[in-house]
Image (cartoon, rainbow, N blue to C red):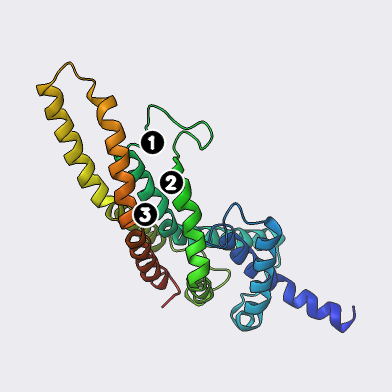
Amino acid sequence: MNPVQAALMDWAPAFALVLARVGAAMALLPGLGEVVAPAFVRIGLALSLTILLLPDLQPMMPPVPAAGLSMGFMVAGEVITGLWFGWVARMIALALPVGAQFIGFMIGLSSVLQPDPELGAQSSALGKLFEIAAPMILLLSGLYRLPLTALDGLFRLIPPGHMLPAADSSEIAIHAVGTGFSLALQLASPFVVIGIVWHLAMGQIARIVSRMQIYFVSMPGQILAGLASLMVTGGAIILAWRDSAQAFLIALPGGG
């Protein structure tokens, strides 16, 4: 075996461990791991990031196990860690389309009784619009760099070959879900309040004028008022989400 082959064999286990975590995280990271992104682009990003990180991470690599099964378990552990990290980071990106779903239901643009066959049973046009806007904002504002920086720091927090701590990872995952859902509700809160007041008013009118088809009379006004409110508050919603996303991504495990 020539020196080049020997060097490659020495680096191969470390490369496999780093690529397993980076590739798994890249599949879910907000902005970079979107489904609409070409697979070759995501694979290229994962390989490039692995090559950049490998020289700094080489000193902390664990000894190569003698049994191939043990090496397989180590790679599987890295994949789990990467998927967990990418999923936690994605929770903040999902807050924007979830908030748009709340808004769509409150202003009458979507209904659980009349799902859109083109977008899916749990989707609306407004939700899809904000779902596209979230990765675009992350890429244009440069916030995509924050999870990449945190991923680099995660290797020092959980060195390669070490298993993900179950208790701490579960606590972080629960906090991420709660943060994403509460942010979605906060973004849609003006429309939730307006929608509740609107429906209470329509209910009182329906009691007074019982023969009027109040649903068909009020629905155009509800949609028009909702779209007008969205036009006024849309920019503020985007900015509020961006600021919250920045704070969340900075606080990711390994970030800061």
First in sequence: mark 3 or mark 1?
Answer: 1
Between marks 3 and 1, how big is the CA–CA gap? 24 Å
Secondary element at tag 1: loop
Q: Which residue is mark 3?
A: 177
27 or 162: nearer the eye?
Answer: 27
Q: Mark on residue 127? A: 2
Between marks 2 and 1, how big is the CA–CA gap? 10 Å
Q: Quadrant of the N terminus?
A: bottom right
Q: Decide if residue 178 is in sight here.
A: no
First in sequence: mark 2 or mark 3?
Answer: 2
Q: Residue furthest top?
A: 211
2 or 3: mark nearer the eye = 2
Q: Amino acid at mark 2?
A: Gly
Between marks 2 and 3, how big is the CA–CA gap? 18 Å
Residue at figure coordinates x 27%, y 36% from the top left? 221
Q: Which residue is mark 1?
A: 110
The quadrant holding residue 226 is: top left
Secondary element at tag 2: helix
Q: Position of residue 190 (x, y in %)?
A: 24, 51
Q: Mark on residue 217? A: none
Q: Position of residue 77 (x, y in %)?
A: 57, 60
Q: Residue furthest right?
A: 2
Asked whether, in this view, residue 131 is left or right of residue 36, the answer is: left
Q: Amino acid at mark 1?
A: Ser
Tell me if mark 3 has few (under 14), some (14-19) or many (20+) residues whose alpha carbon lies within 10 angstroms of its own: some
Say whether marks 2 and 1 touch (CB < 8 Å): yes
Residue at figure coordinates x 39%, y 66% from the top left? 242
Q: Amino acid at mark 3?
A: Val
Secondary element at tag 3: helix
Q: Position of residue 15 (x, y in %)?
A: 69, 71
